[in-house]
């Protein structure tokens, strides 16, 4: 059953928002302080099974066996998840979320409503969470191996039934639907307008094309007035990971699609795409390309002639395992491909950023598990490459520690130097401040490292993107659950920092609500304005519309203070009225017969899926996540997260003989 019914979705070893986008997925977030969310259709079919597996940190590649805190989302303030059970199925066990590695000492389960809306039943092999619906008790979650829990425990986070108070930061803008909305990238034009792009499972700019993820582009003027929204897509998963705007106001976007977005799908799982829109939002052309298993554009840049440069990956299969390499490709402004260059080591190599310099040189940055531009320092090394404008590789560099080191952002200055930003779990340029630390590195055009800076709080601090303005000011954005640029407002906050070309930090500011907020994208305009975008579960610059919303803020580049960008308020897309959200007040307690039914059901379910009562049946899957057909992943941290088909099996072999911390994992790698 596990090999034919469930599809695997693997995220990165950073602190991801690990989001499902189809029914019946195994969502594996690996290392980091992750937030795991299964796909929730806005118009659920009561007869449609939806059983999602959540695996937080059964990571076999963590060299120091850290303890991570994961949050498993089984509801938000607007509705409970997995509460759409078929009335003909006892206790609604045709849909639920199954958490494999919940640890009440450090993990959390997020739920709709209050503790009074639920019943918690210890079945010996785990604990079942049941919500009272109009059709009766409905199982919404099962925590494998967890016993002696209490609904009053602080490991259960109840979101109530009203939006979080706000806006907490009224200077900003928030855009959202009752579904999942993410805006990981931003760009500006020569008229001072700002664009944010990403994906939505709702309707931000038109009807959703199938209720999966649709690409979306939103345009604002410099005061925050919404000028235009473009939503397009196939009936399958499609989303945007890169955006740029040329001097004529044309918009270029790139991303990934599982459907026939720009033509017939060519790869087995997903294709990459690039598209051009004019300043009025009319699509001028779209190109879709792919081969082997999975393809995605992760980053996009343009030059002065409006040529488009893309970086991404192609996941390839082989008899025993899969591999991927860096690729960079160039299209002209009319959508004709000029060249395509793929390169890498014998191990896994993935690029997440691309930038073109004033002289036409092209730089791509990401990570490698191999000897990409030197000898691997341990595990994931940061990787940087330079290509000429004909697509020839001029040099490759890598740097890292014995731990994890990743590049997420790359840009160039007016002198032709290249800067790479990312995060490290090691002592890359200084002693680690505690957990993930951001870093910024500068290279000259010949590939010589001029300096590298590492900074951080005692918490989890990560860089996601960087941007360099016309005056060579360097801006980074990311997220933290510590006090990196101010006092933490609660959970994760977004942060933005400015550096000069000598590596001096000019300022750093932190922004957030009491809820979950992360910063993903950053851009500057010719007038010196700075814009950041990201994701929020709170009421950041408006009222939360349900689940996660996107946000965009305007920032003073001199001080880092927020500027007014609220424009004309937009109506909130209210969640539709659902009879399923009935109160549980005074509901009858579960009976002995129902408990026996649940015990028998979950014992049989764990056996038939091969998971086993202790989760040990997942060992082969974790060692080789491509036993099942892989599927594309939306983002790395709302990953942005971004596609991450990391070499779990490869890393497992590198660490064979090490043991997994018993505080989280039931799997030992011998």
Image (tube, rainbow, N blue to C red):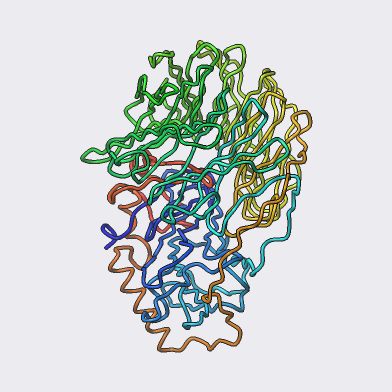
Figure quadrant of the N terminus: bottom left
Q: On the rendered structure, is 438 left or right of 484?
A: left
The residue lying toward the viewer, choosing from 83 and 71, is 83
Q: On the rendered structure, is 253 left or right of 287?
A: right
Residue reaching furthest left? 319
The residue lying toward the viewer, choosing from 159 and 431, is 159
Q: Is residue 536 above or below residue 519?
A: below
Q: Is residue 532 above or below residue 527?
A: below
Q: Position of residue 631 (x, y in %)?
A: 35, 48
Q: Determine the residue positioned at 58% across, 69% down.
A: 112
Q: On the rendered structure, is 95 left or right of 440?
A: left
Q: Position of residue 114 (x, y in %)?
A: 63, 73
Q: Determine the residue positioned at 53% across, 89% down.
A: 588
The quarter holding residue 558 reads top right
Q: On the rendered structure, is 571 left or right of 181?
A: right
The residue lying toward the viewer, choosing from 85 and 275, is 275
The residue lying toward the viewer, choosing from 576 and 604, is 576
Q: Is residue 532 above or below residue 448?
A: below
Q: Position of residue 348 (x, y in %)?
A: 36, 33
Instruction: Report the label total.
Output: 0
The quarter holding residue 597 reads bottom left
Q: Is residue 290 above or below residue 175?
A: above
Q: Position of residue 148 (x, y in %)?
A: 53, 74
């Amino acid at each position: 059953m596990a090999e034919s019914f469930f599809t695997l979705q693997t995220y990165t070893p950073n602190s991801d928002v690990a989001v499902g986008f189809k029914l019946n997925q195994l969502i594996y977030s690996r290392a980091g302080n992750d937030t795991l969310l299964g796909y929730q259709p806005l118009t659920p079919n009561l007869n449609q099974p939806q059983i999602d597996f959540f695996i937080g940190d059964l990571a076999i590649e963590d060299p120091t066996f850290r303890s991570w805190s994961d949050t498993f989302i089984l509801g938000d303030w607007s509705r409970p998840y997995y509460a759409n059970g078929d009335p003909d199925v006892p206790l609604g066990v045709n849909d639920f979320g199954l958490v494999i590695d919940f640890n009440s000492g450090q993990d959390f389960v997020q739920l709709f409503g209050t503790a009074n809306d639920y019943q918690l039943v210890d079945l010996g092999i785990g604990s079942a969470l049941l919500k009272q619906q109009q059709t009766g008790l409905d199982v919404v979650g099962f925590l494998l191996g967890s016993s002696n829990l209490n609904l009053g425990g602080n490991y259960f986070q109840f979101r109530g039934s009203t939006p979080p108070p706000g806006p907490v930061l009224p200077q900003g803008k928030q855009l959202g639907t009752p579904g999942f909305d993410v805006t990981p990238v931003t760009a500006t034009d020569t008229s001072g307008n700002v664009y944010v792009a990403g994906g939505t499972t709702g309707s931000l700019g038109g009807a959703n094309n199938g209720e999966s993820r649709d690409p979306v582009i939103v345009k604002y003027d410099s005061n925050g007035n919404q000028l235009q929204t473009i939503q397009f897509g196939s009936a399958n998963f499609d989303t945007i990971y890169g955006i740029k705007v040329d001097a004529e106001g044309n918009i270029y976007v790139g991303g990934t699609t599982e459907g026939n977005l720009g033509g017939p799908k060519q790869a087995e799982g997903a294709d990459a795409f690039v598209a051009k829109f004019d300043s009025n939002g009319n699509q001028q052309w779209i190109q879709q390309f792919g081969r082997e298993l999975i393809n995605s554009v992760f980053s996009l840049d343009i030059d002065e002639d409006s040529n488009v440069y893309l970086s991404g990956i192609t996941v390839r299969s082989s008899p025993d395992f899969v591999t991927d390499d860096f690729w960079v490709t160039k299209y002209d402004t009319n959508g004709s491909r000029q060249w395509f260059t793929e390169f890498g080591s014998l191990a896994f190599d993935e690029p997440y950023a691309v930038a073109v310099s004033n002289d036409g040189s092209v730089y791509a940055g990401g990570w490698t598990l191999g000897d990409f531009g030197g000898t691997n320092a341990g595990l994931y090394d940061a990787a940087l490459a330079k290509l000429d404008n004909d697509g020839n590789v001029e040099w490759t560099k890598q740097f890292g520690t014995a731990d994890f080191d990743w590049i997420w952002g790359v840009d160039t200055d007016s002198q032709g130097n290249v800067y790479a930003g990312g995060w490290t779990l090691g002592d890359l340029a200084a002693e680690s401040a505690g957990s993930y630390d951001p870093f910024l590195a500068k290279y000259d055009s010949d590939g010589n490292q001029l300096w590298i800076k590492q900074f951080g709080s005692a918490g989890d601090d990560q860089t996601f993107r960087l941007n360099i303005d016309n005056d060579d000011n360097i801006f980074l954005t990311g997220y933290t659950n510590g006090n990196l640029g101010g006092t933490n407002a609660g959970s994760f906050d977004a942060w933005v920092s400015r550096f000069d070309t000598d590596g001096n930090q000019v300022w750093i500011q932190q922004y957030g609500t009491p809820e979950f907020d992360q910063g993903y994208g950053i851009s500057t305009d010719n007038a010196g304005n700075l814009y950041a975008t990201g994701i929020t579960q709170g009421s950041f610059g408006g009222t939360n519309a349900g689940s996660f919303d996107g946000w965009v803020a305007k920032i003073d580049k001199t001080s880092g203070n927020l500027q007014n960008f609220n424009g004309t308020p937009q109506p909130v897309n209210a969640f539709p009225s659902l009879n399923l959200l009935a109160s549980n007040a005074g509901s009858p307690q579960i009976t002995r017969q129902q408990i026996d039914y649940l015990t028998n059901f979950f014992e049989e379910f764990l056996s038939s899926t091969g998971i086993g009562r202790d989760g040990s049946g997942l060992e082969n899957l974790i060692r080789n996540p491509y036993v099942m057909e892989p599927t594309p992943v939306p983002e790395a941290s709302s990953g942005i997260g971004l596609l991450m088909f990391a070499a779990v099996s490869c890393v497992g072999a590198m660490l064979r003989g090490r043991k997994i911390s018993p505080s989280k994992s039931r799997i030992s790698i011998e």
